[in-house]
């Protein structure tokens, strides 16, 4: 069954990323909904390992770009180079021409370089010198960023943040997991042994099956109340965009599919709401502490209306 492929992907990534099944499920929900993923965390938390393991478990081509302050858009997209023999320009593709691109520490590059990914993430294509070049199918971007209080970081503009369907945080490992690391176990050693748990044709079928996941009127009303609250309550400077609202609904369907249901529950929407909304919502500081706007929205909006 196709649903077994999801379990096999989770198990395969779990061989490398210990104790993070919830984050793996959320990442898969994001990818099933054809979205891109932003991971914000401190250095050394396993963000790069996470992306590499996902690519291996899904059988995707994988490339990594280390974003730095001197990185140029052409270093990501590639360029057209003139061939004097054929007297034509030919594309020398950059690392973006892959199925899963890891944009490592994306907020250490300038806004100009960050924006080079906008067309690729939205249109799944790259335009150069008046020509359009399609990207592979499927195409996912997993970007990592360091907390903004760290030196040498540039905040991602709202237009870039809105291209990421979800934002996750891996967090510190549990005590028992960290003990294994201290004893010398290295989960990265298992990366080479991860075999693809799904073929691409089956993955495409899983994505297409989201359309058949039933959403009742009451759940649709709940989603609209959540979105309206972000826009009109005064809690946030800017509410969720229509793109975010559609993405929230698709992630709810994906979460139901991951849990082997053909209908969406309010609990599915609640499970994915914070990862979908948190990086898009800016709430004022209270007592010197940043308000968790996504949590406030969930607390304030009643499921039953």
Image: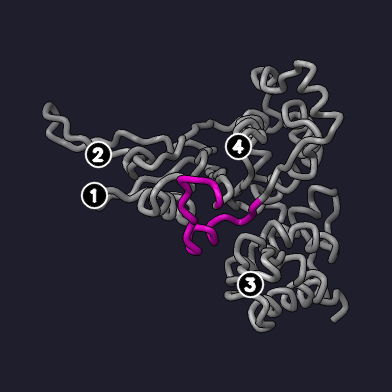
| Earlier sequence position, callout 2 versus callout 3 | 2
Alpha carbons under labels 4 and 2: distance apart = 35 Å
Q: Secondary structure at mark 2?
A: strand
Which residue is at a point 38% across and 42% down the rendered structure image? 69
Q: Secondary structure at mark 4?
A: loop
| Earlier sequence position, callout 4 versus callout 3 | 4
CB-based contact (under 8 Å), mark 2 and mark 1: yes
CB-based contact (under 8 Å), mark 2 and mark 3: no
**Tag nearer the camera, 4 or 2:** 4
Which residue is at a point 21% across and 35% down the rendered structure image? 81
Residue 43 image position (x, y, % from top left): 60, 37
Residue 226 image position (x, y, % from top left): 73, 74
Please state if 270 lies on the left or on the right of 281 as rendered.
right
Residue bearing mark 2: 80
Judge the density around disc 1: few (<14), some (14-19), many (≥20) Cα neighbours within 10 Å.
few
| Earlier sequence position, callout 4 versus callout 2 | 4
Q: Which mark is residue 129?
A: 1
Residue bearing mark 3: 284
Q: Secondary structure at mark 3?
A: loop
Residue bearing mark 4: 43
């Amino acid at each position: 069954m196709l649903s077994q492929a999801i379990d096999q992907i989770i198990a395969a990534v779990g061989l490398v990323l210990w104790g993070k099944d919830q984050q793996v499920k959320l990442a898969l929900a994001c990818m099933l909904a054809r979205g891109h993923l932003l991971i914000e965390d401190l250095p050394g938390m396993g963000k790069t390992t996470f992306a590499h393991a996902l690519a291996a478990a899904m059988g995707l081509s994988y490339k990594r770009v280390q974003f730095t302050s001197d990185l140029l858009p052409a270093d990501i997209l590639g360029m057209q180079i003139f061939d004097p023999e054929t007297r034509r320009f030919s594309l020398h593709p950059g690392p973006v021409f892959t199925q899963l691109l890891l944009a490592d520490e994306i907020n250490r590059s300038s806004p100009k370089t960050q924006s080079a990914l906008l067309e690729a993430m939205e249109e799944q294509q790259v335009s150069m010198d008046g020509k359009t070049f399609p990207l592979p199918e499927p195409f996912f971007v997993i970007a990592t960023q360091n907390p903004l209080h760290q030196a040498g970081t540039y905040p991602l503009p709202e237009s870039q943040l809105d291209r990421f369907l979800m934002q996750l945080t891996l967090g510190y490992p549990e005590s028992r997991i960290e003990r294994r690391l201290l004893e010398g176990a290295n989960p990265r050693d298992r990366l080479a042994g991860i075999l693809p748990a799904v073929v691409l044709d089956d993955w495409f079928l899983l994505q297409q099956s989201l359309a058949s996941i039933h959403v009742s009127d009451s759940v649709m009303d709940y989603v609209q109340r959540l979105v309206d609250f972000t826009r009109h309550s005064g809690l946030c400077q800017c509410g969720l965009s229509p793109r975010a609202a559609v993405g929230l609904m698709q992630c709810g369907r994906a979460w139901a599919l991951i849990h082997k249901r053909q209908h969406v529950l309010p609990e599915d929407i609640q499970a994915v709401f914070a990862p979908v909304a948190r990086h898009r919502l800016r709430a004022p500081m209270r007592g010197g502490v940043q308000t968790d706007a996504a949590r406030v929205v969930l607390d304030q909006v009643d499921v039953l209306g």
